[in-house]
Structure formats: C-alpha cells, structure tokens
Amino acid sequence: MNKTIQHIVVLGGGSAGWLSAGLLAAEHPDKKITLIESANIAISGVGEGTWPSMRNTLKRIGIKEVDFLRHCDASFKQGSKFINWRNLTAGENYYHPFMTPSGYLETDLHAYWQQHAASQKYADAVNMQSFVCQAALAPKQLNTPEYAAVTNYGYHLDAGKFATFLNQHCVSNLGVEHIIDDVTSVHNDLDGYIEYLQTSHHGNLSADLFIDCSGSHARLISEHYNTPLITQDHILFNNRAIAAHLPYTEQQQDIASATLSTAQQFGWIWDIGLPSRRGIGYTYSSQYCDEQTAIDSLKQYAAQSIGHDAAAQLQTRTLHFTPGYRAQFWVKNCLAIGMSQGFIEPLEASALAMVELSLNMLSEQMPQSREHMALLATRFNNRFNYRWQRVIDFLKLHYVLSERNDSPYWQDIKTPRSTPARLKELLNLWQYQAPSRFDLIENEEVFPSASYQYVLYGMGFQTQTANSNNAFNNPAVGQYFYQHNREKIAKYLHGLPSNRALLNQLLSNKADT
C-alpha cells in the first residue's frame, strides 16, 4: 500500500489528455509522464470555449500566450450573450460577462439596480464588460503583459489545433513520452489496482497512476472498472449537436468578444468567432427533434450572415453524447478527467473548466503512496460529485426561467418535475433575497453567485427589495459603484482596440521563440 507514485500514464489525447500530461509534467518533473493514444480514435474536437482560468493553466504549463494564439487560431472571449432565451421578442438578449461587478461584495447591487436603474439591463448597470463585448473589443491593449488585462477573459480556440499544439509543447519542452498505439486489454494486480495496459505494438505499459482521458469511451473508468454514468437527461434534455465551420464574409470582419448563444425551438445554437472562421453548432434533444431538422435549422441560421447559397453548401458533423457524470471519478489508481468523467452539454463551456479543476486538485495534492491515494480518491469523488451537481443546477437555471412555450421541448424542460430539488429551493429563496456568497459555500465554486445573478436578472426574475437601508443596502454606496461603472464604460470603449485589431498586432509583431 506504500508504493510510491513515480510513473503516470495518460490514456487519450485531445485537450483533456494533453492538458493533463502538460500540467503534471510541468509541476512534477520528478515523475515520468507517458501519454498513449490510438491512431484509430479521433478526438471529439468539441470544447472551443474556455474560462479565464485557462490563462493560468497555460502559464503554469510554460506556454507563451502569443504562441498559443497563433497556433490554436484563438481569440479573446469575455463572456456569453444569450439571445431569445427569455422569449421571442425581437432584440431580446442579455450578457453573462466574466467580470464580477465592482462593489459586488461591498453592497447589494441588485437592490440599487431595481430601485434606481431598472430601465437598464442588469449586466449593463453593474458592469462595463457587456458594452466591451457589444463593441467587439479586446480585453487589453498591445503593451499589456501577456495573460494580463483590464477585463477578465478566456479564449475561443480550435480544439483540434489546441491538442496538436499541446502535444508538441509537452513532448518537446516537458519531456512527455508520446505513444501511438491501441490498448487491447487492462490488467489488475492482486489488490484490484491497474498494473499495466497491454498494447498492440509496445508491449505492457505499467504505471502507478492512470489518468483516463479516453473521452466518452471511458476505457478505464467505465469499460474496465464498470463505473456507471449517472445520466441527467431527465433534467437537461440535449444529447446531440450539429457542428459546422463558417467563413467570414470579409477578411477583417469583427471577431465577437463573447460566445453567442441563440435559443431555438428544440435547443440552442452556439456561435464563436476565431480569427480565421466562425464555429457554429446546434445543441438539441433527439427526443424532440430529428437530425435533418436540426441541420436545416443550423443552415437557416448560417444563411442570415453568409447567404442561402453558401449556407446550403456547409459541411456539418453530428455529435452524440449522453448528459451525465460518473458515480465515481477516482477508482483505485484510475482517475477520469474530461468526457470520461462526465459531460452535460456545451452551454456555458464548463467542459474544459472541469478538466482544469480536476488537474488543479490532483497536481496540488499528488498522492505519495497508495494509502495516500485512497484517501485523496474519497475526497476527490465527494468534491466532484458536488461540482457536477452545481453545473447541472446552473445550466438548468437558463431553461427554467424561460417564458418560451413555442414547442413541447420548452414546455417540458421548464416543468418542476425536471428541476433539481436544490435549484427549486434556491429559486424560492431568491424571491426574497438576491443570490450571494452564502448560497454557494464551497471554495472554488464552479459558478459563483455573481453568475447566478447575471442569468436570473437577465431572464427577468423578480426578487423583492428590502424596505430598510442597512450596511449592505446603502443607496449611497450603490450610487458610487453605479457611477464608477458609467465612467469606466466611456474609458474602456475609447481606449481598447477591437478583438481583430489586437490579434492582428500581436501576431504580426511577435514571433515564436
């Protein structure tokens, strides 16, 4: 039980596999890291949006931001814009920006907004970032240091190019051993721990810890250890996505600073801007919509910007997934990360964020022995069971608040019987008080209370305002932060370059080193 952890094998490439190999190799240089992937299994290629946490992850792996931007066809993402989620009124939309509102912990900004600025959209009243996104501006200027910014940001990226870039960096700069081969069988020792993976051409691959990044195949955590998937399709119905790449109609067309998420009759369409193209996709439920209808709907959406003839020629691909998460994520010496751990749907881009959270916990609490590993596995399983449930709550929030009734899909997805009990309790509470840090008490919550406020009040939810003025509901303090935000809007709109302009400058002025 006191066998030390010296060799770690990552099964599967893609973003999850190479992020795992890269971070562990960078932060544990005393350990041997091997990544094995099959030439016969393609990566899913999903996960084109990241959270701001990716900046820190890339820095820890030792990657220069300009190299990442160039090789991954990446752009700056500052949040999400939700269109027609509340209803079908022309122009209906709201933003979920990445920035926490200034003064969020000092005063009840929601109360001030309701009492003094209710004619404005909530995100516009408490934060300047929605205005930055509307203008397709970058989060910083050319002379700002890499990974720093005046507004919080993550990235949009080409997932295939990202995996290739990480592969090259990990092998060339971090000493990760890369094996291309097929695993034919998995063998345990007498204690039920994986002893080695038998491969077609490289013999038996032994290790002390195995990271399962084999995607929805879940070769180790599911096929070998028979860990079931706790399906969530009774809560969140989507299980298909039709994806396509869209050309820009003009070479220097603006690059959107937010993910555009437009609700549809049977789901929603994502639209992200990269320097060379746009990526679009229709996430829907096969219970309510057939594949051809979804493809036709996606092409109709595309036709609005590239014309019907070009849209008709678009090549699409269909992705199948089952929304859910594993009953356990860490079994013996096998830890699932990425889609093998779970996947719900692309809304709010939580997939890569859960990969990062998993790696952070593993890297900072690397087991020293099998006895230590067993203790950490219990803690990890408890923590990530909680986190997956919070992802589900937050994604479901977008649906239950909708006023749409234009299809059985929307009628059914809003019903109380499909809403988690904890979310129903919070919605009852939030009739009387705004979401706060007291509602979500774990450290490193997946979605903080400020994110719940952006969605709640963007969707028109009503919270009663307190009649009394107290230390946390002081109109003078609210006025100060409201005015401070107004001043920053003008300053940022004047001083920030466009997303396109900054990327052009960065990629033309700096070369790889």
Image: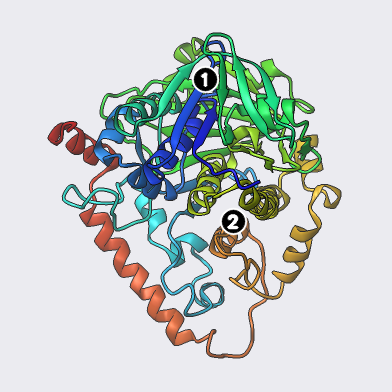
Circle 2 packing at 10 Å, graded few (<14), some (14-19), many (20+), is: many
Q: Position of residue 118 (x, y in %)?
A: 53, 69
Residue occupying image coordinates x 25% and y 62%: 491
Type of the residue with mark 2: Val
Amino acid at dot 1 = Glu
**Can you give x and y, in whole percent of width and height, for residue 412 in the image?**
81, 41
Is the C terminus in the top left, top right, bottom left or bottom right quadrant? top left
Residue beneath label 2, please?
455
Q: Is residue 478 left or right of residue 448?
A: left
Establish if 98 lies above or below 260.
below
Identify the residue under disc 1. Answer: 37
Residue at the spot x=35%, y=31% of the render?
Answer: 175
Residue 90 seen anywhere in this rendered image of the structure: no
Residue plotted at (41% across, 25% down)? 177
Of mark 2 and mark 1, the one earlier in the sequence is 1
SS at mark 1?
A: strand
